[in-house]
Image: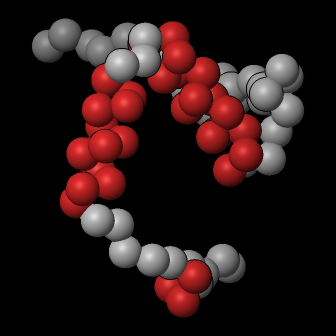
Amino acid sequence: MFRLDRTKGKGYKHENAEKDSAYWKTKTVDERLEAVMYLNSIAYNFDINNPPRMDKTVFSMRKHKIR
């Protein structure tokens, strides 16, 4: 099981958060989504040009009976 190593972090200042927010507000939605996809590819170790497909066998559909 993986555990979070809390010794490898640092604080984040409020001023930096405001700068980051202002920066990302200047980007288009497509540019923001590209950045998210890139970060996901790094975090989950997959090729950004060949992302994994969703396993659709986990989900099921059924009709609800109306009483």
Task: Please identify the quarter of the rendering in which residue 3 is found.
Answer: bottom right
Instruction: Please state the horizontal and vertical placement of residue 19, each as a whole percent of the image.
Output: 31, 43
Q: Is residue 36 above or below residue 11?
A: above
> In the rendered view, would you say 18 is above or below 36?
below
Left or right for 4, reference 15: right
Number of labels in the image equals 0
Most foreground residue, 7 or 1: 7
The residue located at (72%, 38%) in the rendering is 41
Residue that lies at the very extreme toward the bottom in this rendered image: 7
- Answer whether residue 60 is visible to the viewer in this image: no
In the depicted structure, whether residue 60 falls above or below residue 30? below
Query: What's the residue at 82%, 39% (across, down)?
Result: 46
- Rendered image coloring scheme: secondary structure
- Does the image show residue 38? yes
Which residue sits furthest left?
67
User: Which quarter shows the C terminus?
Assistant: top left
Quarter of the picture holding the N terminus: bottom right
Return the x and y of residue 57 as percentages of the image width and height: 68, 27
Q: Is residue 67 left or right of residue 65?
A: left
Q: Give whichever of 24, 64 is nearer the camera.
A: 24
Can you tell which quarter of the image residue 2 is in?
A: bottom right
Q: Residue at x 48, y 22 (%)?
A: 32
Residue 16 image offset from top left, x and y in percent? 32, 54
Residue at coordinates 60% horizontally, 21% vertically from top-left? 34
Which x, y percent locates residue 61?
48, 17
